[in-house]
């Protein structure tokens, strides 16, 4: 039985470390796990990622940025995510549709309704079952990024009000849809945090499995 989990959060929340730790725990529990990321996840997506994140001197206007992120996502859904879900895997995706709504919507100011329509075109009905929000105040996230030694990408270099709008959008989205979003404090120790995130995912998986089983019995 498949489960689609996306990880979201402001820059510097430590999502990629968490996904590695959570993935280890879930595969130790005997599940087929697929780790992937956006922008990226496919050969085309990784090329688009370089265009988008390279801090070079080309300017990318917000609508082009949204379209490139979403084009990479359409490829990712068809080539990686849908096939993995069809074979029953648990998919852990580092950023997905909500990153476009947070960064290009709240951050850049593009209309949410237009972005949502664009996402439907790209996703063709594939949505995360759970969104794990690794929350951190945006200035602490950016400070972590600066201290990590990892080169800053084009979006890391945006100003602090941009990152604050992104973080506020995430917090509100989680409040608006508590059935789908689960919020964790990203400042906790990585190993403890990963134990709790993995437990949340496995609990949801067991619940979905039990409900599907119940539906089958009723049929
Ligand atoms: P990355 O180095 O992967 O950062 P992080 O570890 O914070 O995920 O860079 C991805 C950047 O791309 C990040 O700043 C968020 C941004 N992004 C968008 O603006 N829109 C999107 O739809 C996606 C998927 C990412």
Image: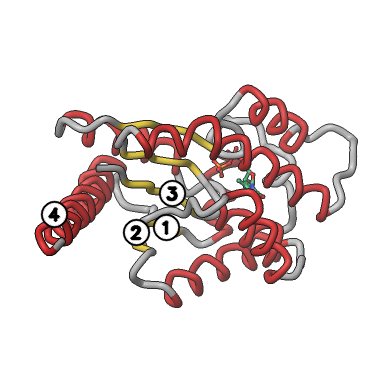
Q: Nearer the viewer, mark 3 or mark 4?
A: 4
- The secondary structure type at the circle numbered 3 is strand
Q: Pointers 3 and 4 in contact (CB under 8 A)?
A: no
Classed neighbour count for the residue bearing mark 1: other residues with Cα under 10 Å, few (<14), some (14–19), many (≥20): many
- The part of the image, by quadrant, that contains residue 211 is bottom left
Q: Which residue is mark 2?
A: 184
- Identify the disc placed on residue 6: 3
Does any atom of ligand 1 lie closer than 8 Å to the CB of label 3?
no
In terms of sequence position, does the residue under pointer 1 or pointer 4 come before the other? 1
Q: Which mark is residue 70?
A: none
Whether label 2 touches label 1, CB < 8 Å: yes
Alpha-carbon neighbours of circle 3 within 10 Å: few (<14), some, or many (≥20)?
Answer: many
Say which residue appears at 52% left-offset and 65% top-offset: 170
Few, some or many residues within 10 Å of mark 4 (<14, 14–19, 20+): few
State the image coordinates of residue 85 (x, y, percent, origin top left): 37, 39
Relative image position of residue 38 (x, y in whole percent): 57, 39
> Horizontal placement of 168 versus 109: left or right?
left
Question: Of helix, strand and loop, which one carries label 2?
Answer: strand
Quarter for ligand 1?
top right
Residue lying furthest bottom in this view? 176
Residue receiving disc 1: 133
Which of marks 1 and 2 precedes in the sequence? Answer: 1
Point out residue 4 in the picture as x, y percentages from the top left corner. 38, 47
Question: What separation in Å lies between label 4 and label 2 (alpha carbons)?
Answer: 30 Å
Along the polypeptide, which appears first: circle 4 or circle 2? 2
In the picture, the quarter occupied by the C terminus is bottom left
Q: Quadrant of the N terminus?
A: top left
Q: CA distance from mark 1 to mark 4?
A: 29 Å
Report crowding for label 2: few under 14, some 14 to 19, many 20 or more residues within 10 A (C-alpha). Answer: some
Identify the residue under disc 4: 213
Say what secondary structure mark 4 lies in: helix
């Amino acid at each position: 039985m498949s489960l689609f989990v996306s990880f979201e959060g402001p820059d510097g929340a430590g999502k990629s470390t968490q996904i590695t730790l959570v993935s280890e725990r879930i595969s130790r529990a005997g599940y087929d796990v697929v780790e992937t990321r956006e922008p990226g996840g496919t050969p085309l997506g990784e090329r688009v990622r370089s265009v988008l994140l390279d801090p070079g001197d080309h300017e990318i206007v917000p609508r082009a940025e949204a379209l490139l992120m979403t084009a990479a996502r359409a490829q990712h859904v068809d080539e990686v995510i849908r096939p993995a879900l069809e074979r029953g895997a648990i998919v852990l995706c580092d950023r997905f549709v909500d990153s476009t709504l947070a960064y290009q919507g709240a951050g850049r100011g593009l209309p949410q309704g237009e972005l949502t329509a664009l996402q439907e075109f790209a996703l063709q009905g594939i949505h995360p079952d759970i969104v794990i929000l690794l929350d951190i105040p945006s200035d602490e996230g950016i400070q972590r990024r600066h201290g990590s030694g990892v080169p800053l990408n084009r979006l890391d270099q945006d100003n602090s009000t941009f990152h604050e709008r992104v973080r506020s959008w995430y917090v509100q989205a989680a409040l608006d849809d508590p059935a789908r979003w689960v919020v964790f404090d990203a400042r906790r120790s990585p190993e403890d945090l990963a134990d709790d995130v993995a437990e949340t995912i496995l609990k949801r998986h067991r619940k979905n499995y039990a409900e599907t089983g119940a539906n089958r019995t009723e049929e």
